[in-house]
Every structure is written in structure tokens, then in C-alpha cells.
Amino acid sequence: MSALSLRLPNSIHRHIKEIASQEGVSINQFISSAVSEKISAISTEDYLVQRAKRANREGFTAILNNVPERTPVPGDEL
């Protein structure tokens, strides 16, 4: 594990301290979790962008053409 010196505005530090206390975790745990969530979100977005680049419109249309015609469930008409 490594240490990181981080400068934060007092207002952000105060919010982190309050939320970490409410959640019953340390400030370090809270920040580590927040950074992990951000990394996950960015990684997921990157994955989806790369996956979308491999998309094939014809293949997608072919799959949709196999879906049978059915009356929508009430509330799903739109």
C-alpha cells in the first residue's frame, strides 16, 4: 500500500469527514472507495466505447428480425 499527500479545499474535506462518519468508515476508506468507483466508471465507459466500435448493424438487425411480434405488456407500449 502506498501513501498519497492530497490537498483539498476545506469545504470538501468537511463534507468527506461528515459523510465518512455517517457511513461509519474512515476518511481513508471513504476516499479509497470513491476513487475506486471513479476508476470503475471510467473503465466501464472505455470498455463500452471499444465494444460499440466492434458493433455490426447488419448482425444487430438480423437478431432483431428473429424477435416474434407480440402485443406489448401494458405500460410498455411506447
Image: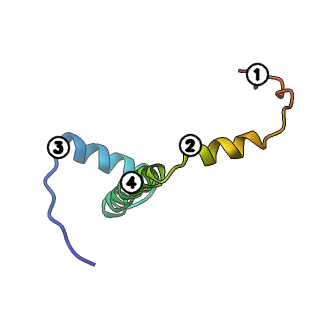
Residue 10's disc is 3
Answer with mark 4 or mark 1, whichever residue precedes in sequence: 4
Going 76% across and 21% down the picture, which residue do you hit?
77
Question: In the rendered structure, which amino acid carries the disc numbered 2?
Answer: Arg
Mark 3 and mark 4: span between their CA atoms? 33 Å
Check the picture and name the quadrant holding the N terminus. Answer: bottom left
Answer with mark 2 or mark 1, whichever residue precedes in sequence: 2
Q: Position of residue 5 (x, y in %)?
A: 14, 64
Tell me, yes or no, whether the two marked residues, 2 and 1, touch with CB atoms within 8 Å: no
Residue 77's disc is 1
Going 23% across and 76% down the picture, which residue do you hit?
2
Mark 4 and mark 1: span between their CA atoms? 33 Å
Residue at disc 2, secondary structure: helix
Going 38% across and 54% down the picture, which residue do you hit?
46
Question: In the rendered structure, which amino acid carries the disc numbered 1?
Answer: Glu
Q: Where is residue 28 in the image (x, y as percent from the top left)?
A: 31, 63
Left or right: 1 as drawn, with respect to 34: left
Residue at disc 1, secondary structure: loop
- Residue at the spot of label 2: 57
Mark 1 and mark 3: span between their CA atoms? 50 Å
